[in-house]
Image (cartoon, helix red, strand yellow):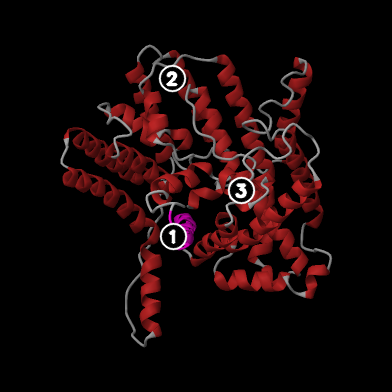
């Protein structure tokens, strides 16, 4: 079920009414409703994969209960690795089986050995990368004694399958989200209004910005050999705003929906395209994944505590694993390695934490230095996105080669250029609003709050109008569903 679908527009109010008006006097019944609604939400795609969520839930709940009683360190490690192997095993099979098989065959063919093996027609379960990491956070934190194991299977099931963030995050930590299922929730009107406001902005990002940019990004990337270097640059820019509008739009809708039900989810995006260096970008982009890898991979590997070699090694490991997490393609690995190369000079010169505050805080106009830093960082990010979007390494190389050709200095031209100019104008408005609202949790969190009610509501109706008039209503899937 898509957030930008009629199905969800019907589903959400029904669950909301049942939650607050039917089950509100019984916490366990409320949690059970969340589980049932979440399974219905996920099963709307393919009910067969509900068994994977249920199995993962049972395994980690059982492991947690046994870790509560077990004091023997060796047995505790066995229990931890049982959870890791089950979860990563399912993820590896569905997401990476054919990738490893194809590369295994290619490697042996290089040495003259012809191996016959058939790829499997495997359907990737939606959201498996997200809920797998979420359940692993529970087991690891219980193992480290940072979290008391739960005895409530319904609450734990709700934590694993919570429908707003089930299929594309934010990847919640058990220490943050799970305790919220133990506490009685009361309806908070101000919180619900704020949630609706964030949902509205998320829909604008998805339907107006991301889906319109996607049409031109797909057209240009899928026919890149036919276009000039300047047009390919435009295609990369379209994709950059597509992936940001799509993924951060999903996160806004997920967080806003959660607030309607009295839950607080972690922030997943913090205006990353206003970053002044790559380190700042990665503190602001897909925050739930970046911090997950930091806490459960980078720090256990030694983090930045060792010598230069350890810093370099750990940086490449975390970025390459992050790239591989996104998909079974060498393009994602190169994308991760490229970001590691961007990041390393900052780390090795101890400048990776230079920009912790919001850019031009309290000011409308940034300094020339800030503008230069933002444009340079954005340019490096757009270049890396070419590998992320390309079909394979050869496609990415040919795409970049054409950009670096003399045709870079020609006028961009492709079918639908007039409509694309409208989308470019909308992106300009979008960037302006994001800039004005960059100190809030999301762009319109505080925008117009102090205005008189008629003026403030006129702004909201204007956003609704832009969605209705310029929105792409083809019910396009969110881009991160494929990861």
Q: Position of residue 73 (x, y in %)?
A: 19, 43
Count of numbered badges drawn on the protein: 3
How would you rate the neighbour count of disc 2 (Cα within 10 Å): few for under 14, some for 14-19, many for 20 or more?
many
| Left or right placement of residue 97 versus residue 230 in this view | left
Say left or right for 416 vs 353. Answer: right
Q: Which residue is mark 3?
A: 281
Report if residue 396 is visible in the image. Answer: yes
SS at circle 1: helix
Question: Residue at the spot x=52%, y=25% of the render?
Answer: 259
The numbered mark, 1 or 3, whose residue comes first in the sequence reads 3
The answer to whether residue 122 is magenta is no
What residue is pinned by disc 2?
19
Q: Secondary structure at mark 2?
A: helix
Instruction: Say which of 107 and 360 sits in front.
Output: 360
The residue mark sitting in front, 3 or 2, is 3
Is the C-beta separation of discs 1 and 3 under 8 Å? no
At label 1, counting other C-alpha atoms closer than 10 Å, the crowd grade (few under 14, some 14-19, many 20 or more) is some
Q: Residue at x 60, y 45 (%)?
A: 246
Question: Which label was assigned to residue 310?
Answer: 1
Residue at the spot 61% in from the left edge and 31% down from the top edge: 441
Q: Name the mark nearer the viewer: 1 or 3.
A: 1
For residue 5, what is the image quadrant?
Answer: top right
Query: Can you give x and y, in whole percent of width and height, for residue 349 in the image?
Result: 59, 56
State the SS at label 3. helix
Q: Nearer the viewer, residue 102 or 387?
A: 387
**Which residues are the magenta region?**
306-327
Residue 362 — which label? none
The residues bearing labels 1 and 2 have C-alpha atoms spaced at a distance of 50 Å
Frontmost residue, 9 versus 229: 229
Label 3 vs 2, first from the N-terminus: 2
User: Height in image: 198 above or below 135?
Assistant: above
């Amino acid at each position: 079920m898509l957030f930008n679908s009629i199905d969800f527009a019907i589903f959400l109010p029904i669950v909301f009414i049942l939650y607050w008006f039917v089950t509100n006097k019984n916490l366990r019944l409320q949690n059970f409703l969340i589980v049932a609604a979440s399974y219905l939400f996920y099963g709307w795609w393919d009910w067969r994969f509900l068994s994977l969520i249920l199995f993962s839930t049972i395994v980690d709940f059982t492991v947690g209960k046994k870790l509560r009683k077990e004091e023997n360190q060796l047995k505790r490690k066995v229990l931890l690795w049982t959870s890791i192997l089950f979860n990563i095993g399912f993820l590896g099979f569905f997401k990476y089986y054919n990738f490893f098989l194809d590369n295994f065959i290619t490697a042996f063919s290089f040495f003259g050995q012809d191996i016959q093996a058939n790829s499997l027609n495997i359907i990737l379960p939606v959201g498996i990368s997200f809920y797998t990491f979420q359940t692993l956070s529970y087991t690891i934190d219980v193992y480290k004694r940072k979290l008391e194991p739960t005895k409530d299977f319904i609450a734990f099931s709700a934590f694993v399958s919570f429908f707003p963030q089930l299929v594309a995050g934010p990847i919640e930590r058990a220490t943050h989200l799970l305790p919220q299922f133990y506490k009685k929730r009361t309806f908070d009107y101000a919180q619900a209004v704020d949630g609706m406001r964030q949902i509205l902005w998320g829909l604008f990002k998805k339907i107006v910005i991301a889906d319109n940019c996607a049409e031109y990004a797909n057209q240009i990337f899928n026919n890149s050999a036919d276009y000039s270097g300047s047009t390919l640059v435009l295609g990369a820019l379209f994709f950059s705003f597509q992936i940001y509008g799509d993924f951060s739009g999903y996160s806004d809708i997920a967080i806003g929906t959660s607030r309607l039900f009295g839950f607080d989810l972690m922030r997943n995006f913090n205006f990353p395209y206003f970053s002044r260096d790559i380190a700042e970008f990665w503190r602001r982009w897909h925050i739930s994944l970046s911090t997950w890898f930091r806490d459960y991979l980078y720090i256990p590997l030694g983090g930045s505590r060792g010598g230069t070699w350890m810093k370099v090694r750990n940086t490449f490991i975390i970025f390459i694993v992050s790239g591989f997490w996104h998909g079974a393609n060498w393009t994602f690995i190169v994308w991760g390695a490229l970001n590691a190369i961007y990041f390393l000079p900052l780390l090795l010169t101890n400048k990776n934490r230079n920009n912790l505050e919001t850019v031009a805080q309290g000011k409308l106009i940034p300094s020339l230095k800030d503008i230069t830093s933002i444009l340079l960082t954005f340019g490096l990010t757009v270049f890396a996105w070419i590998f992320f979007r390309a079909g394979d390494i050869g496609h990415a190389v040919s795409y970049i080669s054409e950009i670096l050709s003399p045709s870079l200095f020609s006028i961009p031209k492709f079918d639908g250029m007039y409509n694309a100019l409208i989308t470019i104008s909308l992106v300009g408005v979008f960037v302006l609003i994001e800039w004005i609202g960059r100190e809030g949790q999301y762009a319109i969190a505080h925008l117009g709050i102090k205005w008189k009610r008629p003026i403030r509501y006129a702004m909201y109706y204007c956003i609704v109008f832009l969605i209705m008039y310029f929105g792409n209503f083809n019910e396009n899937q969110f881009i991160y569903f494929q990861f």
